[in-house]
Image (spheres, rainbow, N blue to C red):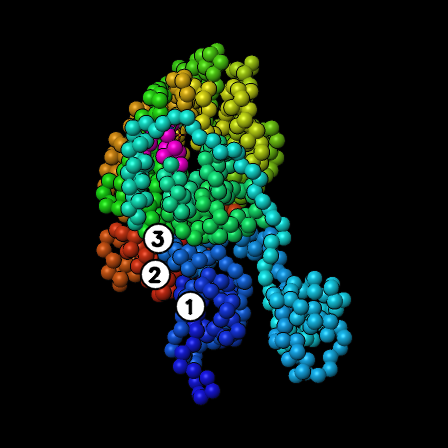
C-alpha cells in the first residue's frame, strides 16, 4: 500500500457491552486479521475519549476504506464457541426481547465456557528464519541466546516455552531479548489442564417393548420431517404416561444416524434425574449439561460439542445454545414449563429460542407436552409450519387416574373448623397405605404458614422490605421472606404497641401439611420435598431413590414432586389447596392450575394400579378444575382461547411488560405515567394499529426490597409490531426515565 491510501480494509462490526442496541464499525489492524473471527470478544475505543470497551465481533468483511473508522484495540478471546450461526440467533433474540446485542451474546455462552475453565495459556516459540541466516545477519550473540536458538532450530514445530527454558537453562529475559529483536516468534495456545473426562454413564440398554400404534404414527410423522429437511414444529400432545420420551429418543437416533446432532431441552434438570438416567442409557455420545457440573467439565463439554464429538446434548436453558456443528433436531420436553423463561435480560423463553434456531437452520423442532401452552396449542391449530401429533392413551392401555374434587367450604362448614386433610383425602390415604401402595401430597407453598396476622387490630405482619408477608418455618424458629430472603425470629405477639395480642398464622405451607399427615398416620414414613429440605442435588436423589425403593410411604412436597417422576407404586395423589393465588393478577392462572393438576395427577397409577386423585379447593367451579376432572385439555383450551380472544390477550395479542421501580412511590408513579404517555404517542406516530398501553398500575408485588414497583403493559397485534414499537421507543429516547430501574419483559410469563 505504498502509493497513498489503501482502497479497501477489513472492517469488523462490533456490539459493545454498553446499554445500546446498535453496533459500531472498526478497522481490523493487520496483526489481528489472523486471530479475529465472528463471535470473538475484542476491546474497542468508544466515545470522544476513546475509552476501551469490551464487545463482540458480529460482522467481518472487506469494505471500502473509510478514514473515520478507528482500529480495534485488542482481541480478548483466542477462541469462541459463538459460531456465526449462533451470532445470527443472538441478533434475533436481542431484537425480539429488546436486549442489547452484546448482553445477549454474553448470556449465550456459560460463564465457565467463556473464560475457558480447564484450559491454560501456553506460550510457544519458533525461529523467525533459519539458524544460519540469523547468525550470519546478526553476528555475535551470547551463549545462552545461542543455546536457545539452537534448541529451536532442532525442532520443526514451535516449542513450548516452559520446556525450552528448562532444557536450555535460559531465562525469560533472554528469550524476550530474542523476540524483541525479531529472531524468535512467540505465539500462545490454549491447552487442557485437566482432562475432566465424563464419568461413565449408565450402560446402554434397550427397552423390550415395541412402539404402540399412536407412538409409531407420531414417530413416522416426525421422521418424515427429518428426512425431508426444512423447518417444522411438531407438537407431540400426549397424556402423561403415553410414552412421549420413547418417541423423542427414536427421532433423535434417526438424526444421529444421519451424521447430525440433536439437542433435547428439559425443565430444571434436578427435577428430572430419572428422565436423564433413562435418556443417557439410550445414546452413545451424550452430553448432559446439568447444574452439578464443575466449571472445567462444562467448559470441556462445550469443546467436545463444538468438535462434533458429542452427538446428543441434553440440558436446561443454556443447552439451547450448544455449538453443535451440524444440528439436525431440537426437542423441547414439557414445552409449557415456566422455568424455560430466563429471569434476567435477555428474558428469552428457551422454547421460543429453540423455534427461532430451528427456523434459522431450517431443521425440525419437536415440542412435547400433556398440557401444551395455550400459545403453542393455538399455533398448532392454525399455523402451516406446525403439525399436531396426539398420543391419546397411556402405554399398555393403563387407565387415566380418577379425579375427585372436594369443596373445602363444605368441609370447613360441616366440621366447624379449618381442615387441611379432608375426610375423602384421609380415607383414600388410609386405603392406599393398607394396600401397601404409596402416596404423593402436593402443597404449593413451602414453610409452615405464609402470613402472620393480628386478629385483634387487623395488623398484617409483613417483611420490612417487601409486601410479601412472611413465611413461617417452625422447625428453625424463624420467619423468612421468600422475595428478599430476610430472616427474623418469628414474632409471637402483635408488634403494634397499643395492641400486643397473640398473632394468628394464616395460610398453609408444606411443613404444616407434613406435620398434619404425620399426626394422622403415625405409622407411615412421611418425607417432605421442597427447596427448603432439598438444598442439594444429592438429597433429592436420595429421596427419589428411597421413594422408589418403597422406604417412604408418603411424599409431601411442592411442585418439585409434580414433575416428571415415574414411580410405579404411587396410586394416590392429593392436592391440598388448588385455589390459584393470582387469579386476578395473572391471566394465565387458570392455565397454570390446569397444568399443575394434570401433571400431579399423572404421577398416580403409572403401573398396574389404577390411580386416584383428590383435589381440595374452595373454588370448584373454576373451568380449569372442571376440565382437569375429565382430563379434557382440548375443551379447556377451546374455552380459554375464547376468553383470550374476547379480552384481547395472548395468543391474539403480543405483550411486553415494563416494570419501573424506585424507593419513593410518588416518584415511580409519576415516572410511569410519563412513560405511558410517551408510549401512547409513539404508537400514534408509528401508526401501529390495534396497539395500546395498559397502566400504569402498581405491580402485584407492589414493593420488593424496599422499592416500589409500577407496571405498564404494551399490547400489539403481532410480534413484528411489538418489535417495531420497542425499537421506536428505544431510538426516540422515550424509555429514558429517572426511575432506579426499568425492566422490559417481552412475552412475560410472570405477572408479579
Ligand atoms: P410420558 O413422557 O409421555 O409421560 P414416558 O415416556 O415416561 O411417558 O413413558 C411412560 C413409561 O412407559 C416409561 O416407563 C416407558 O419406558 C414406558 N413405555 C413407553 N412406550 C412404551 C410402549 N410402547 N410399551 C410399553 N411401555 C412403554
Ligand atoms: Zn422481603
Say whether residue 312 is visible.
yes
The reply, left or right, for residue 166 in relation to residue 634 is: right
Front position in the image: 672 or 301: 301
| Corner quadrant of residue 649 | top left
Is 240 one of the magenta-colored residues? Answer: yes
Q: Secondary structure at mark 1?
A: strand
Quickly name the residue at label 3: 361
Count residues near mark 1 (Cα–Cα under 10 Å), then give few for <14, some for 14-19, many for 20+.
some
Count residues near mark 2 (Cα–Cα under 10 Å), then give few for <14, some for 14-19, many for 20+.
some
Magenta residues span 237-249
Front position in the image: 24 or 427: 24
Tell me where residue 688 appears, x and y as whole percent: 25, 58
| Corner quadrant of residue 671 | bottom left
Question: Looking at the image, is 350 positioned above or below residue 726?
Answer: above
Quickly name the residue at label 2: 727
Quickly name the residue at label 1: 60
Q: Secondary structure at mark 3?
A: helix
What residue appears at the point 67 percent right and 64 percent down from the top-left corner? 161
Tell me where residue 619 appears, x and y as whole percent: 35, 27
Cα distance in 3D space between marks 2 and 3: 26 Å
Is 329 one of the magenta-colored residues? Answer: no
Q: Secondary structure at mark 2?
A: helix
Count the labels in the image: 3
The reply, left or right, for residue 349 in relation to residue 506 is: left
Tell me where residue 263 appears, x and y as whole percent: 42, 44
Tell me where residue 171 appears, x and y as whole percent: 74, 69
Cα distance in 3D space between marks 2 and 1: 24 Å
| Corner quadrant of residue 100 | bottom left
Amino acid at each position: 500500500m505504498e502509493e497513498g491510501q489503501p482502497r479497501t480494509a477489513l472492517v469488523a462490526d462490533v456490539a459493545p457491552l454498553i446499554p445500546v442496541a446498535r453496533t459500531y464499525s472498526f478497522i481490523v489492524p493487520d496483526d489481528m486479521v489472523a486471530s479475529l473471527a465472528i463471535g470473538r470478544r475484542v476491546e474497542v475505543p468508544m466515545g470522544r475519549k476513546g475509552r476501551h470497551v469490551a464487545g463482540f465481533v458480529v460482522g467481518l468483511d472487506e469494505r471500502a476504506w473509510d478514514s473515520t473508522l478507528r482500529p480495534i484495540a485488542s482481541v480478548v478471546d483466542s477462541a469462541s464457541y459463538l459460531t456465526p450461526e449462533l451470532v445470527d440467533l443472538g441478533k434475533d433474540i436481542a431484537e425480539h426481547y429488546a436486549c442489547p446485542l452484546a448482553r445477549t451474546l454474553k448470556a449465550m455462552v456459560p460463564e465457565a465456557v467463556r473464560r475457558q475453565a480447564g484450559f491454560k495459556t501456553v506460550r510457544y516459540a519458533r525461529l523467525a528464519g533459519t539458524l544460519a541466516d540469523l547468525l550470519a545477519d546478526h553476528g555475535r550473540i551470547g551463549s545462552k541466546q545461542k543455546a536457545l536458538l539452537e534448541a529451536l532450530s532442532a525442532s520443526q514445530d514451535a516449542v513450548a516455552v516452559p520446556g525450552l527454558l528448562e532444557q536450555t537453562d535460559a531465562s525469560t529475559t533472554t528469550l524476550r531479548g530474542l523476540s524483541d529483536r525479531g529472531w524468535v516468534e512467540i505465539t500462545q495456545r490454549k491447552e487442557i489442564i485437566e482432562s475432566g473426562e465424563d464419568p461413565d454413564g449408565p450402560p446402554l440398554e434397550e427397552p423390550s417393548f415395541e412402539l404402540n400404534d399412536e407412538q409409531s404414527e407420531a414417530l413416522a410423522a416426525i421422521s418424515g420431517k427429518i428426512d425431508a429437511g426444512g423447518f417444522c414444529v411438531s407438537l407431540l400432545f400426549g397424556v402423561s404416561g403415553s410414552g412421549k420420551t420413547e418417541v423423542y429418543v427414536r427421532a433423535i437416533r434417526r438424526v444421529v444416524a444421519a451424521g447430525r446432532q440433536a439437542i433435547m431441552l428439559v425443565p430444571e434438570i434436578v427435577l428430572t434425574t430419572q428422565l436423564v438416567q433413562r435418556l443417557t442409557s439410550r445414546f452413545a455420545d451424550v452430553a448432559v449439561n446439568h447444574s452439578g457440573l464443575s466449571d472445567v467439565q462444562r467448559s470441556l463439554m462445550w469443546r467436545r460439542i463444538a468438535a462434533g464429538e458429542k452427538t446428543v446434548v441434553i440440558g436446561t436453558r443454556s443447552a439451547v445454545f450448544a455449538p453443535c456443528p451440524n444440528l439436525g433436531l431440537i426437542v423441547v420436553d414439557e414445552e409449557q414449563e415456566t422455568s424455560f423463561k430466563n429471569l434476567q435480560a435477555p428474558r428469552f423463553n428457551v422454547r421460543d429460542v429453540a423455534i427461532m434456531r430451528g427456523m434459522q437452520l431450517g431443521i425440525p423442532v419437536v415440542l412435547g407436552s400433556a398440557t401444551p401452552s395455550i400459545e403453542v396449542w393455538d399455533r398448532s391449530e392454525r399455523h402451516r409450519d406446525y403439525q399436531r401429533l396426539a398420543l391419546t392413551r397411556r402405554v399398555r392401555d393403563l387407565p387415566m387416574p380418577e379425579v375427585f374434587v372436594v369443596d373445602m367450604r363444605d368441609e370447613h362448614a360441616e366440621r366447624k373448623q379449618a381442615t387441611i386433610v379432608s375426610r375423602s383425602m384421609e380415607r383414600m390415604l388410609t386405603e392406599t397405605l393398607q394396600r401397601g401402595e404409596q402416596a404423593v401430597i402436593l402443597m404449593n407453598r413451602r414453610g409452615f404458614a405464609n402470613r402472620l396476622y393480628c386478629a385483634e387490630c387487623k395488623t398484617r405482619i409483613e417483611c420490612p422490605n417487601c409486601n410479601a408477608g412472611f413465611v413461617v418455618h417452625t422447625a428453625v424458629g424463624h420467619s423468612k421472606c421468600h422475595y428478599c430472603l430476610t430472616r427474623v425470629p418469628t414474632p409471637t405477639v402483635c408488634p403494634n404497641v397499643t395492641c400486643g395480642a397473640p398473632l394468628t398464622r394464616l395460610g398453609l405451607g408444606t411443613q404444616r401439611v407434613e406435620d398434619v399427615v404425620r399426626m394422622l398416620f403415625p405409622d407411615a414414613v412421611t418425607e417432605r420435598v421442597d427447596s427448603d429440605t432439598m438444598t442439594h442435588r444429592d438429597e433429592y436423589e436420595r429421596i427419589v431413590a428411597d421413594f422408589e425403593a418403597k422406604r417412604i410411604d408418603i411424599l409431601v412436597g411442592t411442585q418439585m414432586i409434580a414433575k416428571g417422576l415415574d414411580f410405579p407404586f404411587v396410586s394416590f395423589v392429593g392436592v391440598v389447596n388448588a385455589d390459584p393465588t393470582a387469579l386476578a393478577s395473572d391471566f394465565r392462572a387458570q392455565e397454570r392450575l390446569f397444568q399443575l393438576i394434570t401433571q400431579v395427577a399423572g404421577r398416580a397409577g403409572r403401573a398396574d394400579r389404577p390411580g386416584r386423585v383428590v383435589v381440595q379447593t374452595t373454588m370448584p367451579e373454576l373451568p380449569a378444575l372442571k376440565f382437569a376432572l375429565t382430563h379434557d385439555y382440548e375443551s379447556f383450551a377451546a374455552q380459554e382461547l375464547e376468553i383470550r380472544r374476547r379480552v384481547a390477550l395472548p395468543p391474539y395479542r403480543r405483550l411486553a411488560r415494563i416494570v419501573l421501580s424506585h424507593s419513593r412511590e410518588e416518584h415511580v408513579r409519576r415516572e410511569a405515567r410519563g412513560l405511558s404517555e410517551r408510549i401512547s404517542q409513539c404508537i400514534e406516530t408509528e401508526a401501529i394499529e390495534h396497539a395500546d398501553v395498559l397502566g400504569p398500575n402498581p405491580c402485584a408485588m407492589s414493593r420488593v426490597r424496599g422499592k416500589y414497583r409500577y407496571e405498564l403493559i404494551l399490547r400489539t397485534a403481532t410480534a413484528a409490531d411489538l418489535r417495531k414499537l420497542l425499537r421506536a421507543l428505544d431510538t426516540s429516547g422515550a424509555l429514558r426515565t429517572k426511575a432506579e430501574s426499568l425492566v422490559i419483559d417481552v412475552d412475560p410469563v410472570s405477572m408479579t
